[in-house]
Amino acid sequence: MVQVVHRHGARSALINDNTTEICGTLYPCGELTGEGVEMVRAIGEFARSRYNDLSLVESPLFPSTQYNSSLVYTRSTHTQRTIQSATAFLRGLFQDDYFYPVVYSRNRTTDMLLSTDAVPSVMGRSWLDNPALYAALNPVIDEHLSWDAIQSAAKDAWIEGLCTDFNARTSCVLYMYDVAAAFEAAGRLDNATNLKAVYPGLMEVNAAWFKYVFSWNHTSKLDLTQGSASQNLAQTMLANINAHRLSPSYNMFEYSAHDTTVVPLAVTFGDQGNTTMRPPFAVTIFVELLQDTADASGWYVRLIRGNPVKIANGTYVFRQTGIEAHCIDAAGIRYRASAGICPLDDFRRMVDYSRPAVAEGHCAMTQAQYSNMGCPRTIADNKPVPSRCWIYRYACPSKACPVTYILSAADHQCYPGAGIPNSSSSSDVTTASSSEGTTTSSSEGTTASSSDVTTASSSEGTTASSSEGTTASSSDVTTASSSEGITASSSEGTTASSSDVTTASSSEGTTTSSSEGTTASSSDVTTASSSEGTTASSSEGTTASSSDVTTASSSEGTTASSSEGITASSSEGTTASSSEGTSSSDVSFFKEPASWMPHVFSPKKGRHIAADILRGVPNGFTVGAVVRKHDEYYSRHRQ
């Protein structure tokens, strides 16, 4: 079994102004280009060749050239270029004319499996503290680029208007890098002399951005609390491995995403080097599950990283670049993987090494980051919920409100007691409790959770676990139902919609700078659903799901069944925190009283309830989720 995580192929730049001059007329800004399609198709061709090679496998993983959805599970972020890239990969893997691929996706504002922008800790570093970001990147800019050179290059890049303020040069340079990278892939950089001259410096700044946002240091209390940014994906991959060992299902899991997905995944695997921080278009990590032919109990994981390169005849081939993966043995000693191979248990320990040290650690932010979200403290503030605050409260509902206040699923405001608008009464709503806290339901069917357990329920809808096991519910925000969920699939990467839900990204939404940037959000955004319900088993924790209730698992892997009786079991229970056992009781990033601050954590060694909630194995099923569109989306967005 193999799992593949790749960035989309080459795209046009992500920019709002001068779009015709920058992006041309053939491809809208932010869209996958013809070069990008060929890049990712080359990855699929490499995979087909490798995993049908009898010197590497006992029998071909893909014996037929016809697409077979029972062999490959494909998940993409809810962005056209990643959906199209997922399809291009499958086209390289299955080359027959019979080609009707299934690509699952989920709303980008709530997809914490593949979109790290939906992870609050990442959102905080990326967008919510510009002074800290500028302090980290401005010295790199000043070392490699002069202000005069930047302004000259800005003319070549058609972004002069973004480069008028010296004090905001970081934003200017990140936009400029995005344009330059798109120009290079399209063969236009040679004609932009000034832009080409500064391109090496732009790459240094972009690498510094990735290091600032995604590097992880076990000596940092904040890093220990938050965990590495791709923990959700890494833990899901571990769960997929465990499920495959128990009952083989798919031969391949394909995840089509962004550089902001692949970079932190490599960090989780122990590689924080220069290659990691400079992700090219279509950079790919393969995670191969190996079994010792002489010892059936001997399981190993091999990591491969590479990207497509253009050869003399103008076609693309996949070239391995290596990955400095690490393993941790039973004694807690970290070592570099030989040829990218770790014993499975040592690989698991490496992944868990950067797991959040406290429950819901991904919700932790500094004081400045939290303040800059602009969250209203309660409904009494009479302020709307800004877009990033909405994302935070969706991801961290148990951290969202002061004590005695309850988060409304309808508007994400904090209301006193049980008085929440637009939540109808439900006597049969079941909530889950952990060994650290219990939840109670109000007469309106809304749950009030403890600081360590996250539940949100309503009488109308609840999402359960899909391939990443994310939970959350509300009558307006999330519903899990195959009749209204949507399977996003087509050979062109178009997301299909049901009569109740409209999907597809809009090219008119907000875009931003960076090496990945953003495309627009859809009007009502949806994801893939299966016609069956969903049960997802996790290798270390459990989530339960049904059409009526969302439950949260405890640290021992216990699940609470819903009124429909649908639960998912854990094969191993929950493991402890990082190998160093660090849980910082003195971690406090805020000046406000801890009695109401939603993100001050007390130490809970060995408790990883949030991580358990966010894990699951698709095993052929995915629960659809229809998430209402907030009236504000990112003003800037890197993908």
Image (tube, rainbow, N blue to C red):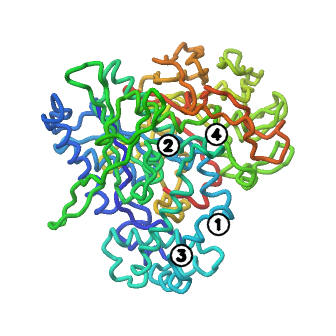
Q: Nearer the viewer, mark 2 or mark 4?
A: 4
Asked if the residue under mark 3 is in contact with the one under mark 1, i.e. CB atoms within 8 Å, the reply is no
Asked if the residue under mark 4 is in contact with the one under mark 2, i.e. CB atoms within 8 Å, the reply is no
- Viewer-proximal residue among 630 and 362: 362
The quadrant holding residue 391 is: top right
Task: Identify the residue under disc 4.
Answer: 225
- Sequence order check, earlier mark of 2 and 1: 1
| Mark number, residue 143 | 3
Q: Is residue 182 left or right of residue 164?
A: left
Secondary structure found at label 3: helix
Task: Identify the residue under disc 2.
Answer: 230
CA–CA distance in space, label 4 to label 3: 32 Å
Task: Identify the residue under disc 1.
Answer: 135
The answer to whether 118 is drawn above or below residue 575 in the figure is: below
Q: Amino acid at mark 1?
A: Ala
Specify the quadrant that holds the N terminus: top left
The answer to whether 384 is drawn above or below residue 360 in the figure is: below
Residue 629 at x, y percent in the picture? 60, 47
The residue at 43%/78% (across/down) is 21
**Mark 2 crowd level (few <14, some 14–19, many ≥20, 10 Å Cα):** many
